[in-house]
Image (cartoon, helix red, strand yellow):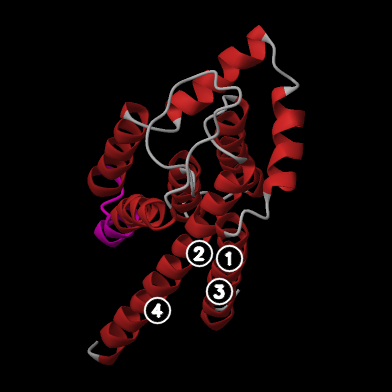
Amino acid sequence: MNLKLQLTRAFFISLLSAIAFGVIALLVSDKKIAQFDNAIISFVQGLEAPELTTIMKFFTFIGGGYPVVMLTVLVLFFLYKILHHRRELILFIWVVAGSALLNETLKIIFHRARPTLHRIVNANGFSFPSGHSMAAFSMYGILAFLLWRHISTSVGRGLLIISSIIMIIAIGISRIYLGVHYPSDVLGGFLASGSWLAVSIWFYQRYQEKVKRSSLKHS
């Protein structure tokens, strides 16, 4: 796939994700998404069982706090010390830190209260969009992007994508199951992070091409 096509695709993914997030945000603000939320909450929480609760608590644990910090440190070490890719390191920090800052900003703007009907674990702060969902999408999305080029086999790449998708979806669903987020919070988080991730990759690839052209020009 040529660079122009990659840039075009990244731009439109970012744009469409931003538009979709805007639609969800409007529905949340106008309180017209309750039926959607209630239907999914009823289904997901209707699956409640002791074993499943343990699994969901695990996914919600690794989706925030110390596990995310530890994973971030490991990735930074891998990119800097082993691969010696400083630009990729900067991109990783930009995406992860930017996503966290964006999430806090959006929470303040929308100040949506968390659901209270059936909460299995405690959580503080505003609800929309889900911070765990945004962090998961950004973290595993950028990891998949950065590691893709270092995996030579189609099987390896397929496993990378599948494992990333599973982690993102599982962390998002765990927030609904545990009663600390509405489904629209999770969906909004995925869309907001998807837009941020895609536009970040767009800028990164444009910068890489600019550096490459400059290097060829002066060689």
Q: Residues within 10 Å of mark 3 (few under 14, many from 20)?
A: some
Where disc 4 sits, the SS reads helix
Q: Which residue is mark 1?
A: 17
Asked if the residue at tag 4 contacts the one at tag 3, i.e. Cβ–Cβ closer than 8 Å, the answer is no
Residue at left offset 55%, top offset 74%: 15
The quadrant where residue 45 appears = top right
Q: In what quadrant of the picture does the C terminus appear?
A: bottom left
Q: Position of residue 119 (x, y in %)?
A: 55, 22
Asked if the residue at tag 3 contacts the one at tag 2, i.e. Cβ–Cβ closer than 8 Å, the answer is yes
Asked if the residue at tag 1 contacts the one at tag 2, i.e. Cβ–Cβ closer than 8 Å, the answer is yes
Q: Is residue 85 magenta?
A: yes
Highlighted magenta segment, given as a residue range? 82-92
Q: Which residue is mark 3?
A: 15
Q: Is residue 120 above or below residue 99?
A: above
Amino acid type shown at disc 2: Ser
Q: Which residue is mark 4?
A: 206
Mark 3 and mark 4: Cα distance apart in space = 17 Å
Query: Which dot marks residue 195?
Result: 2
- Viewer-nearest residue: 195 or 204: 195
- Viewer-nearest residue: 116 or 158: 116
Asked if the residue at tag 3 contacts the one at tag 1, i.e. Cβ–Cβ closer than 8 Å, the answer is yes
Q: Is residue 174 magenta?
A: no
Pick whichever of labels 2 and 1 is earlier in the sequence: 1
Amino acid type shown at disc 4: Arg
The quadrant where residue 69 appears = top left
Amino acid type shown at disc 1: Ser
Residue at left offset 69%, top offset 33%: 41
